[in-house]
Structures are given as C-alpha cells and as structure tokens.
Amino acid sequence: MPKTGVLIEIAADGKVKDTNYGVLTAARGKSGNEVYALIIDSSAGVDAIKGELAAYGVQKIVVITATNDLQNSPDLQATSIIAASKEYGFNSLLGLASASGRDIFARVAALLDEPMASDCISVDVDNKSAVKSHFSGKTFATVQLDCSMMIATIRPNAIEAVKLADSGPDSVEIITFNAPATDSGKVKRVEVKKGSSGKIELTEAPIIITGGRAIKASENYKMLEECAAIMGAAVGASRAAVDAGYAPHSMQVGQTGKTVSPKLYIACGVSGAVQHFAGMKTSKIIVGINTDKDAPIFSKCDYGIVGDIFEVIPALTKALK
C-alpha cells in the first residue's frame, strides 16, 4: 500500500489546525493510502489529538524528535523529515502552504533534489499530479511531477475535509522517531514576536469579510469586525483600502497580498479587479456587496447585493445576533 506523510501544524493552544484536515483528505488518495501524521517535537499531548487525526484517515502518528533544538532550526526540521520519509518509505509528502510549510518543504525538496508543487488547490497522490493557480489566478494548470517521492504544499481550505466513518483513536499507532539528522547551523530562530490582536489569521479563516475603498475610513472596519466576530470570521482589505491607509498590509487580500480559500468570502465595497480576484477566486462561496450594479465583482460572485455596505452590514449583523 502506498504511504503518504503529512506534516501536521499544531496551533498555540495545542490543538490541530483545522486546515490540516483537507490535506489529510488529499493524502488518502483514491486508492486509500496509508497516512502518517508527522509532528515536530510537539509539547502538545499527542494522545489528546489522535482521535481527531484518526477521523481523517491517519493510521500512524510519528513524533519527530532530535538531540538538538528542533523547534528553532528549519534546517534540522527539514533533514529530520527527510530521515523519517526514508525510514517509513513515503511515496508522497504533503503539508500546508503556510509560512512554516513553505519554508520547510522548500528545504526538503532542495536537499532531496526533487521537484515540488507549492500552493496547490488539488493533488492526486496516486498519479503524482497537482492543480495550481497560474498567471495571477487567471487560469489553473495540472502539473505532473517526475519524481521518486511527491512533495507538495496545499493552500489552506482549498480541499474540502472529509471524515472517515469507521476510524477511532484506538486504530492509531504513535511512534517516536529520534531523527539521526544534522543541523547546518546556517539558520536559527532566536525569537518569535506575536501580534496581540488575537484575530483569526486570514489564510486559515473559514469565513472572510473584506472591506474595499468604499469603507472610507479605518474606523469603519469596526463595523466589519463586529459582524465577523459573530460569524467566527477574519477581516480583510483590498489593495485600494490599504493604499488609502484604511488598513495595514497584513490584512490585504489579492495578488500583492494574501491568497485565501475560505468557505465564505464577503466582499464589501470591493470592485472586483482582477488583482484582487486572483487572491480569493478559490473561495467556495463569494458574496459581493456594492452600490454599482455594473461592478466587476458581480460577474464573479455566487450571490450579489446591490446596496450600501453601511446599510447591508449592520442589517446582517443585527440578523445574525
């Protein structure tokens, strides 16, 4: 049976990030691959999360440890993952196209001298192929990897997570793998400074409400934040709003901002320019709100509301409450 390794990302609260589940779904493949969950020297209680992982097809959890400071060395993490891949004979290695995933997987591919498909919206581990966005989101391409082991990162929320009905925590085997890996010492993480906002990360959010130039002022984002808080959503901004000084670049969605794939994307006063659409076109459901009935967003959304966001959003918030 083919084997797929999946690098699992753990949140600060010790829980498995929900975006991992779509990757695990892809890892199973059409033929029912044996799925290994790789966890980097986590302080999280593995016993507490094995039931969640089993529900999405994980048969074995490999907790990777090393004699050196594994958490703060991306080079050591990469060589440790390679050692585990060789130890258990993986045919494919998947992970999230997150900040961490992009860093580690690029190192793994370079060290193995293998091709890598990054930021995929779909993968076929059986045929070693993947679907990726090309030309700033204008089209999609299916790429075939000529490789001994498929290496790919998947855009968060791009693949719908599907549970297995007959898997429980008792079906999972937990393995501790002490990686015989060496650290190049070229890169070392010395400090992590986290924002104090406590807001949901845009790329991880299942729902996003984005304000465009029509938001008119930075303080008006409070209206979107109030609605987002009820829905468990993140708040984004268009480039026009960022350039106008209404929001920081960290909130920007689009070609020059963040690429997102939420289940629901609500564009408030966003015209729908191709540069913005490139960053959110893989959203499952798109709702556009604009006073201009001829705005480009209405040709790209699933549902459109011709109206003033300062009337529509408060009404939506009230209805949700």
Image: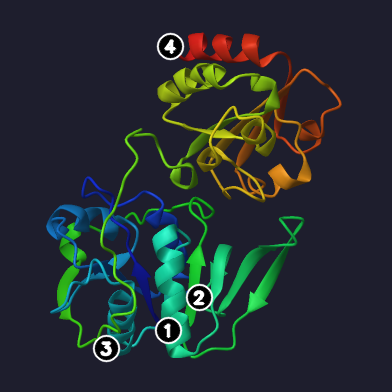
State the residue at coordinates (50%, 51%). 160
Dot placed on the residue nearer the N-terminal end, 4 or 3: 3
Q: Disc 4 to disc 3, how far (Cα)?
A: 53 Å
Dot 2 crowding, Cα within 10 Å, few <14, some 14–19, many 20+: many
Q: Which residue is label 1 attached to?
A: 91
Mark 1 touching mark 2, by CB under 8 A? yes
Quarter of the view holding residue 9: bottom left
Dot placed on the residue nearer the N-terminal end, 1 or 2: 1
Which of the image's four quarters has the N terminus? Answer: bottom left
Number of the front mark, 3 or 1: 3
- Mark 4 is on which residue type? Lys
Q: Which residue is label 4 attached to?
A: 321
Answer with left or right where residue 317 lies relative to residue 300: left
Q: Which residue is label 2 attached to?
A: 125
Residue lying at the far right in this picture: please name it: 294
Image vertical order of residue 46 relative to residue 116, above or below? above
Image vertical order of residue 295 relative to residue 25, above or below? above
Dot placed on the residue nearer the N-terminal end, 4 or 1: 1
Number of the front mark, 2 or 4: 4
Answer with left or right where residue 118 lies relative to residue 214: left
Q: Which residue is label 3 attached to?
A: 87
Q: How many marks?
A: 4
Q: Disc 1 to disc 2, how far (Cα)?
A: 8 Å
Which of the image's four quarters has the C terminus? Answer: top left
